[in-house]
Image (cartoon, rainbow, N blue to C red):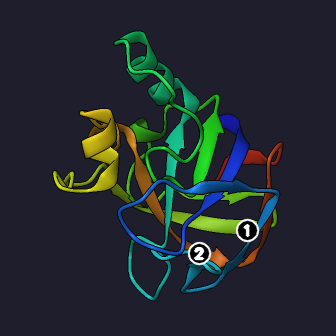
Amino acid sequence: MKGKVIAVNISEKKGVFKKTIEQGDFKVDHGLIGDAHAGNWHRQVSLLGIESINKMKALGVEGLIAGKFAENLTTEGMELWKLIVGTRLRIGDTIQEVTQIGKECHIKCEIFQKIGSCIMPTEGIFTRIIKGGIIKAGDEIEVIE
Protein backbone atom coordinates (compact mmCIF):
# COMPACT_ATOMS: atom_id res chain seq x y z
CA MET A 1 0.00 0.00 0.00
CA LYS A 2 1.43 3.36 -1.05
CA GLY A 3 0.29 6.94 -0.95
CA LYS A 4 1.78 10.39 -0.99
CA VAL A 5 1.90 13.55 1.08
CA ILE A 6 -0.02 16.42 -0.47
CA ALA A 7 0.53 18.94 2.35
CA VAL A 8 2.51 19.46 5.55
CA ASN A 9 0.57 21.58 8.08
CA ILE A 10 1.50 23.31 11.35
CA SER A 11 -0.04 25.44 14.09
CA GLU A 12 1.47 27.16 17.10
CA LYS A 13 -1.74 26.68 19.16
CA LYS A 14 -3.98 23.66 19.77
CA GLY A 15 -7.60 23.66 18.57
CA VAL A 16 -7.08 25.85 15.49
CA PHE A 17 -6.68 25.27 11.77
CA LYS A 18 -3.15 24.52 10.67
CA LYS A 19 -1.36 26.41 7.90
CA THR A 20 0.45 24.62 5.09
CA ILE A 21 4.24 24.90 5.03
CA GLU A 22 6.76 23.93 2.33
CA GLN A 23 8.38 21.21 4.44
CA GLY A 24 8.44 20.01 8.02
CA ASP A 25 11.28 18.83 10.24
CA PHE A 26 10.14 15.82 12.29
CA LYS A 27 12.08 14.87 15.42
CA VAL A 28 12.23 11.45 17.14
CA ASP A 29 9.94 11.20 20.21
CA HIS A 30 8.59 14.69 19.46
CA GLY A 31 6.87 15.13 16.10
CA LEU A 32 6.79 18.23 13.87
CA ILE A 33 9.16 20.85 15.27
CA GLY A 34 7.17 24.02 16.04
CA ASP A 35 3.75 22.34 16.10
CA ALA A 36 1.53 22.75 19.18
CA HIS A 37 0.60 19.04 19.21
CA ALA A 38 4.20 17.80 19.17
CA GLY A 39 5.72 16.32 22.31
CA ASN A 40 6.79 13.09 23.93
CA TRP A 41 3.45 11.28 23.74
CA HIS A 42 1.64 8.83 21.44
CA ARG A 43 -0.03 11.42 19.18
CA GLN A 44 3.02 13.26 17.87
CA VAL A 45 1.80 13.49 14.25
CA SER A 46 -1.73 13.48 12.84
CA LEU A 47 -2.59 12.32 9.32
CA LEU A 48 -5.79 12.66 7.30
CA GLY A 49 -6.43 11.70 3.68
CA ILE A 50 -7.72 14.13 1.08
CA GLU A 51 -10.29 11.41 0.32
CA SER A 52 -11.75 11.94 3.81
CA ILE A 53 -11.77 15.71 3.34
CA ASN A 54 -13.57 15.22 0.01
CA LYS A 55 -16.30 13.21 1.80
CA MET A 56 -17.02 16.32 3.88
CA LYS A 57 -17.02 18.48 0.73
CA ALA A 58 -19.56 16.07 -0.83
CA LEU A 59 -21.84 16.75 2.17
CA GLY A 60 -21.82 20.42 1.20
CA VAL A 61 -19.13 21.72 3.54
CA GLU A 62 -17.33 24.51 1.71
CA GLY A 63 -13.84 25.95 2.06
CA LEU A 64 -12.13 22.73 3.10
CA ILE A 65 -8.42 22.68 2.37
CA ALA A 66 -5.37 20.95 3.83
CA GLY A 67 -4.98 21.70 7.54
CA LYS A 68 -8.65 22.49 8.21
CA PHE A 69 -8.96 19.38 10.38
CA ALA A 70 -5.72 20.26 12.20
CA GLU A 71 -3.87 17.38 10.54
CA ASN A 72 -0.08 17.62 10.24
CA LEU A 73 0.04 15.56 7.06
CA THR A 74 -2.65 15.61 4.40
CA THR A 75 -2.25 12.45 2.35
CA GLU A 76 -3.56 10.92 -0.84
CA GLY A 77 -3.99 7.34 -2.03
CA MET A 78 -4.26 5.42 1.27
CA GLU A 79 -7.20 4.47 3.45
CA LEU A 80 -5.36 5.46 6.61
CA TRP A 81 -8.11 4.36 9.00
CA LYS A 82 -7.71 0.77 7.75
CA LEU A 83 -4.11 0.59 9.01
CA ILE A 84 -3.58 -1.14 12.34
CA VAL A 85 -1.84 0.25 15.41
CA GLY A 86 1.81 -0.70 15.21
CA THR A 87 2.04 -0.34 11.41
CA ARG A 88 5.25 1.42 10.37
CA LEU A 89 5.29 3.97 7.58
CA ARG A 90 8.19 5.47 5.66
CA ILE A 91 7.19 9.06 4.90
CA GLY A 92 9.83 11.27 3.30
CA ASP A 93 12.99 10.87 5.37
CA THR A 94 11.05 9.64 8.42
CA ILE A 95 9.82 6.37 9.80
CA GLN A 96 6.62 6.60 11.83
CA GLU A 97 4.57 4.10 13.81
CA VAL A 98 0.77 4.23 13.88
CA THR A 99 -0.31 4.67 17.52
CA GLN A 100 -4.02 5.51 17.28
CA ILE A 101 -6.87 5.38 14.76
CA GLY A 102 -9.41 8.18 15.20
CA LYS A 103 -9.92 10.33 18.27
CA GLU A 104 -12.54 11.90 20.45
CA CYS A 105 -13.73 15.13 18.85
CA HIS A 106 -13.41 18.23 21.00
CA ILE A 107 -16.85 19.80 20.49
CA LYS A 108 -15.75 23.29 21.49
CA CYS A 109 -12.67 23.49 19.24
CA GLU A 110 -12.47 26.01 16.40
CA ILE A 111 -12.59 23.25 13.80
CA PHE A 112 -15.96 21.89 14.95
CA GLN A 113 -17.42 25.36 15.49
CA LYS A 114 -16.52 26.55 11.99
CA ILE A 115 -17.28 23.35 10.09
CA GLY A 116 -20.05 21.85 12.26
CA SER A 117 -18.78 18.32 11.76
CA CYS A 118 -15.52 16.42 11.78
CA ILE A 119 -14.09 13.39 9.98
CA MET A 120 -10.97 13.18 12.18
CA PRO A 121 -12.68 11.05 14.87
CA THR A 122 -13.20 8.17 12.45
CA GLU A 123 -10.66 8.52 9.64
CA GLY A 124 -7.71 10.45 11.05
CA ILE A 125 -4.71 8.58 12.44
CA PHE A 126 -1.84 9.39 14.75
CA THR A 127 1.79 8.33 14.72
CA ARG A 128 5.00 8.68 16.67
CA ILE A 129 8.35 9.41 15.07
CA ILE A 130 10.78 6.46 15.08
CA LYS A 131 13.33 8.07 12.72
CA GLY A 132 13.34 11.82 12.22
CA GLY A 133 13.81 13.86 9.07
CA ILE A 134 12.22 16.15 6.53
CA ILE A 135 8.78 15.65 4.93
CA LYS A 136 7.45 17.74 2.05
CA ALA A 137 4.52 17.63 -0.36
CA GLY A 138 5.01 14.95 -2.99
CA ASP A 139 6.90 12.58 -0.67
CA GLU A 140 5.85 8.94 -0.93
CA ILE A 141 4.18 7.09 1.96
CA GLU A 142 5.00 3.41 2.15
CA VAL A 143 3.99 0.71 4.62
CA ILE A 144 7.15 -1.08 5.80
CA GLU A 145 7.74 -4.27 7.76
Picture coordinates of residue 66, whole percent (x, y): 59, 41
Closer to us: 133 or 8? 8
Picture coordinates of residue 116, whole percent (x, y): 24, 33
Residue at position x 78%, y 61% in the image: 135
Residue at position x 61%, y 52% in the image: 73
Residue 22 higher or lower than 11, as above or below: above
CB-based contact (under 8 Å), mark 2 and mark 1: yes
How packed mark 1 is, by other alpha carbons closer than 10 Å (few <14, some 14-19, many 20 or more), is some
- Where is mark 1, residue-wise? 94
Check disc 1 and give the amino acid type: Thr
How many numbered markers are drawn? 2
In the displayed structure, does residue 38 sit left or right of residue 114? right
Q: Write down the quadrant of residue 124 in the picture.
A: top left
Give the secondary structure at mark 1: strand
Q: Write down the quadrant of residue 85 in the picture.
A: bottom left
Give me the C-alpha separation between circle 2 and circle 1: 7 Å
Closer to us: 15 or 139? 15
The numbered mark, 2 or 1, whose residue comes first in the sequence reads 1
- Where is mark 2, residue-wise? 129
User: Which quadrant would the N terminus be assigned to in this image?
Assistant: top right
Check disc 2 and give the amino acid type: Ile
In the displayed structure, does residue 62 sit left or right of residue 132? left
Picture coordinates of residue 121, whole percent (x, y): 27, 45
Closer to us: 8 or 97? 8
In the displayed structure, does residue 56 sit left or right of residue 23? left
Closer to us: 73 or 2? 73
